[in-house]
Each structure stands twice: as C-alpha cells, then as structure tokens.
Amino acid sequence: MGQLRILVLCPHYVPDTAPTGEVMASYCEQWASRGHQVEIITSLPWYQDHALADGWSGRLVRTQPEPWGRIRRWHPFPVNKGRLAARAAAFVGFTALVGTDAVVAAGRCDVVFAMSPPLTLGVAGRAAAWRARAPLVFNVQDVFPDAAVETGVVRSARVAAAASRLERWVYRRAAAVTVLSEGMADNVRAKLDSAVGPDKVVVVPNAADADRIAPSDRRNPYRAELGLDGDAVVVMYAGNLGHSQPLELVVAAAERFSAQNRADVQFVVNGDGVARSSVAEAAERLDNLHLVGWQPPERLGEVLAAADLHLVLLRAGLGATSVPSKVYSVLAAGRPVLASVDRGSEVERVLVDSGAGRAVDPDNADVFCAAVAEMADDPDDLVEMGYRGRAYAERAAGPQQVADRYLELFQKLMGK
C-alpha cells in the first residue's frame, strides 16, 4: 500500500477530553504509524467546561506541526449546551473556518475523512473533497437529527426538517458513510435514494484498546477518595450527563436501596452535563448516591476499575442512532455492564455475545431497579462477567484493526 495523504475534519482531538477526540486520535496515530501523511483540522480544546481550556485562549487558530503532518485547531465559539440557537450558530461559524481551511488543504490530500456530529462538518468535507477530486468518507458517531428529536433537544419541526434535508444531502454526496452498528446502518440506508447501492453504508465499530485499558484492583485511590467501603458493591454511571441518558433511573435505584437500608450497595455518577443538577439534588439527600465531577483521561483505568457494575443508559428510541463507546472500555477493564437500552440494539448484541452483562427495556424504573438488585446480590457472578468481558475485548478488533479497515476502504474508493 502506497503512502496516502489523509485530510481529517473532526470536532475534537486530544488533548480535548471528548470521547470522539480519543476515537479520532486512535485512528490517526495508527495511520501515521504506517507511514501515511495525516492533516487534522479540528477545534481548540473546549469540551470539558464548554469553554476554551486553560492555555488555549488568545488565538483564533493554532498550528501544530508533526513528523507525519500537522494539526490545525480552530476556535469553536463554545456555548452552553442548553442554548440551542447559539450552539447552532457556533457550529456554523466553526464549520466555516474549518471548511475554508480544508478547501485550501485539499490540494494536498488523497481522501477526506469527516466526523459527525456536527453534521455541518459533512458540508466542509464535501467542499474539500470536491476541491481535491478525492472521495469523502463521512463518519457518523451519532445519527443527527434523530437523537436530538428523540430526546426533545430539537422541538421545532422546521428545524428538524431542515437538518434532515442537510443530513440526506451529505449522505448522497459522500463516497462512503461509516457507522458504528447495523442498526445505525439501517437508519442511514433508509434515508438514501433507492438508486444508491447498499454498499455505500459501511459498518465499522469503534474499538476498545485492550492494551491501554486493562483490569486492575477495585480497591484503588479513586474509590478511597469517595470513602467507599471496600466490601460495598459499587454501581457506577460514568459519562455524559445529558438529555440522552435517563439518569433518573440511577436516582430511583439509589432511593429504593436507601429505603431498604442497603448500605452495602453504593451508586456513583461520574461526569458532567446539563442533567447534573437533578443528580446533585438527589445526592444531597441520599447517603448512597455519590456525584463526582469529570476525571482526567489518565485516571480512566482507575475509574473503570473502581466499580463492580457499570451502567450504560440510553433513552428509548436511541439504540439505532448511538452506540456509547464506553461499553468497549468497560469490557476491556474487565467489568460487567447493565444497560438500559432498546432491545435488539448494538449494545445488547455486544453484551449477549460477550456474556459480560445484561440489557433491560429502556426507561422502565421497576425493571431497571430489579436488575440492579439481582446483579448486585451476586458479586461472584459480576466477577465472572467481568472476566468474560475482558476476553471479548481481547478478541475484538482493536485500534490497529479498525484503522486498517479504514485504509482498505480508502484504497477501494480511490480505485487502487
């Protein structure tokens, strides 16, 4: 395989803390290690507090030369997630800067790889691909606007219709659309013209790095900082506290265990987002519910290891539009999962195939709480599920294999 020049457009990149930034970095590092030239156009770090991270303010753009190419970071005009109109305007402004830069850089590329959300990066990617006469690979991490409509973030029918038209426009003009699951693939294919071949939509799941994330002792400093008894069963949700996550299920479970005087089961919610305040209120009155702020990436392994059972939560209707990448990280850490998700979703498939947990119907507090109680009351089985999850992660495709699948796709689209 000859050297490729890959132009990447993405909303986040390390050291930004967004999960998609970690995903994109794993791909680019693998491509660079194989001798390919990679040019990344992204944002200045801002995800954690929805404000520019310390040390990154004061400039509209920063250029970071690398032996394998360069990283260009543009100002993302960060705003609070709750301000939808302002956020949309920020995406448009950021996309205009990225798109202009990408069109200039396109003369040096063989393929354009654009990540969504935001959907607008597909427009920037299309402009760059047209300029370079190169294929556009559009990587969909979450299907937009479907997820936003399902969760009520987008309530205007006119806004949803406009976003849907833009979504279909990008899909039609991409050489390939990559998604994380068969459910997402069915969703995207249903929106394409009947004349478009089904091969245009390609399933490439995100990968857990089983070399970087490994099982470790549950009795660690993170757990000690929370003052948790070493013998307690810790049930943890770690991730975004947003509209898509029914965190009221965690509160309901904590309330029921508290009413039963079950101090042997402790609940931890680790993260930040627009739903934080509702969890904070409950944590103030419940001794068995602990709310912890965002933790730096270097503590990921420690956080994952501290829990005896991890929770994956998605509201009903989102199973075909989103696949939380943390599922793979939890399995790599050798911990089991209880998922409240659509039945038949990719998350349920992974848990069934791995034997590393179970899935229950979404948005059903009674079913969820019963499952938590049943699993927490059998700690030996939790350990066994963790072993099976780790074995599954070791067998599954890692970052190297996923990056190679993309390289094969690039070559195919280029006719090489």
Image (cartoon, grey):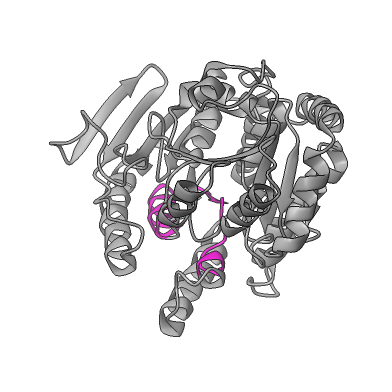
Q: Bounds of the magenta span? A: 120-148
Q: Residue at x 32, y 58 (%)?
A: 91
Residue 119 visible (yes or no): yes
Position of residue 17 measured from the top left corner of the image (x, y, whole percent): 42, 35
Residue 341 is drawn in which quadrant?
Answer: bottom right
**Does the stretch in magenta take in 306?**
no
* 321 over 285 or under it: above or below: below
Q: Is residue 365 left or right of residue 7?
A: right
Tell me, yes or no, whether the highlighted magenta stretch contains residue 121.
Answer: yes
Q: Is residue 369 above or below residue 14?
A: below
Q: Is residue 33 above or below residue 262?
A: above
- Which quarter of the rendering shows the N terminus? top right
Q: Quadrant of residue 310?
A: top right
At 52% from the left edge and 25% from the top edge, which residue is drawn? Answer: 227
Left of 52 or right of it: where is 109? right
Relative to 87, is 52 above or below? above
In the rendered image, residue 161, in percent from the top left (x then y), is placed at: 48, 80
Q: Position of residue 285 (x, y in %)?
A: 48, 50
Image quarter of residue 14: top left
Quadrant of image for the C terminus: top right
Residue at the limit of the structure toward the bottom, as seen here: 157
Left or right placement of residue 97 versus residue 335 in this view: left
Q: Does residue 8 appear to the left or right of 336 in the view shown? A: left
Q: In the depicted view, which residue is nearer to us: 222 or 52?
A: 222
**Front residue of this view, candidates 385 and 372:** 372
Q: Residue furthest left?
A: 58
